[in-house]
Image (cartoon, grey):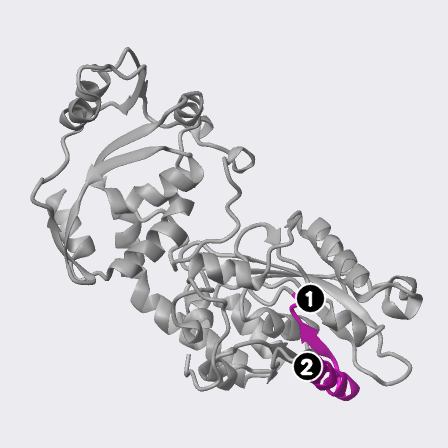
Amino acid sequence: MRVMIFITFCGLRLKDMDSVSRAVLPKFYLENLNLQAFEALDSAGSKVVITSVPRVMVEGFLKEYLTVDSVVGTELHTAGKFFTGLVSSSGLLVKHRALKELFGEKRPDVGIGAQTLHDHLLISLCKEAYVITKDSPNSRMPRNRYPKPLVFHDGRLAFLPTPVAMLSMFMWLPVGILLAIFRLFIGICLPYNLALLLGLGSGINLKISGHAPPQSADGKGVLYVCSHRTLLDPVFLSISLRKPLTAVTYSLSKMSEIMAPIKTVRLTRDRKRDGETMQRLLSDGDLVVCPEGTTCREPYLLRFSSLFAELADEIVPVAMNTEVSMFYGTTASGLKCLDPLFFLMNPRPGYDVRILEKVPEQLTCAGGKSSHEVANYIQRELGDALGFECTNLTRRDKYLMLAGNDGVVKENRKN
C-alpha cells in the first residue's frame, strides 16, 4: 500500500488530486458499486466510512453521492502545494483501531466490510455485520439506481484501470499512436470515398442511416444540427454525406483548426455577430452546428442554444453517438488539441450517424414557433432517436464541475 501510494502521489499537485477525486473517480466507483452494500448503507441514519486508502481519493465521492457524514482514511504528507508520496506521521490507517478511537466504548449498529482480515476485525466490533462477497454481474448497481445521475466526468481512460487492463493499454499504445496518425492522414488528405474505405479497413466502426435532403429552392445551405460527442462530429458527418461542410465552433484550439479536414469557423459568443456569421456561411453552403456547445460522454443531451433556430428554415437534426473501449476523445481539463488523437487511438472507435427527417416548416420559426420551441423540439427528437435523456444543464455547468472554470478559452491560448 505504501509503494502504491508513493507511485501515485509523489509530485502530484493538491489541486490536481481535487480535480481527479471530483471529476474522474466517481465514474469508476459508481460503475463498481455493490447494490446490496449500498442498500444497507443507505438504510442507516448516520454514516461513517473507515478505509485504509488515502482519504482524498474517496471523500468527495462518498459525501457527494452516498451522503456519508464522515470519512476516516489514511492521511498523506504534503510539501506546499504538492504531495510527497509519503503517508503522514500517523501511518497507514488500521480500520478496527480507527473505529475504537472514533466510537470509544460504543458499538456501531451496523458494519459493512469485505472478506478480508482487517474488515472482519472491523465489523466484529459492530452490533450487526454484513460481509460483501465476490461480485456477480447482478450485484452491480444499474445506472437507473444511481443515487445521483452521472452526467459529467473527465479523464482519458474509458476502462477500469486494473493491472491487466493497464498492461494491455501500454502494450497497445505504440500501435495506437501510429494507427491514429494514419487515420488522421486519410481523413485530412484523401477524398471521401477512399477515406471511408481505408477508415473502415483500419478498424473504425461507422454506422450511417438516413439521407441528406435535397438542396433548398432558394439556394441556401442546409443547417445540420448535431448532438455533440467529440470534436470529430462534423468530420464524420461530412464523410457520411460525402460532401464538404462548414462547422462553427466555440473555443477550438489552433491545432484542431489546422488538423480539421473541413472548414471551421469560430464563434465569438456575441449573439448578433455569431448570427450574422452563420447567415453568411449558410448562404455559401451547408453548415453544421452543435447547439449543446460542449460534448457529453454519457447518455444525456445538454440544453440547446436557440440561436441556430433563428437563422434557417431548412433544419436537419443529426443524432451522433460514439463508442470507445480504451480512451475518451474529449477532455475538460487536459489538452483539447489531443482529443481527436485519443479518440482515433482506440482499437475500434465507433461512430453512429443518424440523419433524421428535415424539421417540418410548421415547426420552425417560419411556421410561427419561437426559437426556444424549435431548439427544445429538436433536442427531444435527438434524445428520442438516441435513447438519451434531455437536460437543462449547460456548458458552464460542465466546466464548473469538472475544471473549476466557465469553459471559455481565451483567444491567445494555444490549446
Q: Position of residue 353 (x, y in %)?
A: 65, 62
> According to the image, label 2 marks what residue?
274
Q: Position of residue 301 (x, y in %)?
A: 63, 55
10 Å crowding of disc 1: few (<14), some (14-19), many (20+): some
Gap between marks 1 and 2 measured at Cα: 12 Å
Q: Tell me if 283 is positioned left or right of 207 in this view.
A: right
Say whether disc 1 or disc 2 marks the residue closer to the N-terminus.
Answer: 2
Span shown in magenta? 272-291
> According to the image, label 1 marks what residue?
305
* Element carrying mark 1: loop
Q: Residue at x 47, y 74 (%)?
A: 183
Q: Residue at x 41, y 83 (%)?
A: 414
Q: Is residue 286 part of the magenta span, yes or no?
A: yes
Q: Is residue 222 part of the magenta span, yes or no?
A: no
Amino acid bearing label 2: Asp
Relative depth, front residue between 355 and 209: 355
- Res 229 visible: no
Relative depth, front residue between 84 and 223: 84
